Amino acid sequence: MSALAQPTRLAVLTILTAAGPDGLTAGELAERTGTPANTMSAHLTILSHAGLTASRRAGRNIIYRALPETVRDLTAYLTENCG
């Protein structure tokens, strides 16, 4: 939950969820959120450690994607316990 308490990380997770399995690069995420690249890297690390995102290498790029099963589980938990 603390990973999503920060507005940029919540925005990144929202963007990645909408992007689907193809995901986006850190540069694309930084551009869409208006966040410096080094700051975006830190946000992505936090989201990854929280189990909300995963990454894969594609050539010279690293592609980030949301983990839909974790997002679904989090949504279900919030709906059942915080509603």
Image: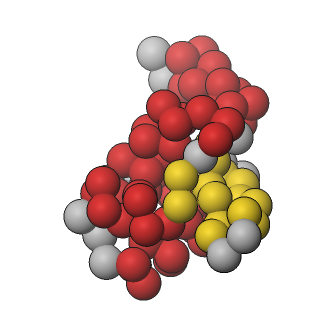
Q: Position of residue 5 (x, y in %)?
A: 40, 53
Residue at the outermost left position: 34
User: Residue 12's x, y, as percent?
Assistant: 43, 51
Q: Is residue 33 above or below residue 65?
A: below
* Nearer the observer, 61 or 52: 61
How many numbered discs? Answer: 0
Determine which quarter of the picture holds residue 22: top right
In this picture the colour scheme is secondary structure
Q: Residue at x 36, y 47 (%)?
A: 11
Task: Looking at this view, name the residue that lies furthest to the front.
Answer: 59
Give me the residue at 43% from left, 68% from top: 27
Name the residue: 66% across, 76% down. 60
Who is closer to the viewer here, 82 or 59? 59
Residue occupying image coordinates x 45% and y 16%:
83
Between 55 and 3, which is closer to the camera in this rendering?
55
Query: In the image, is 33 to the left or to the right of 14?
Result: left
Specify whether residue 60 is in view: yes
Q: Please state the horizontal and vertical placement of residue 16, each as a whole percent of the image.
A: 52, 43
Relative horizontal placement of residue 83, taking residue 54 as reference (left or right): left
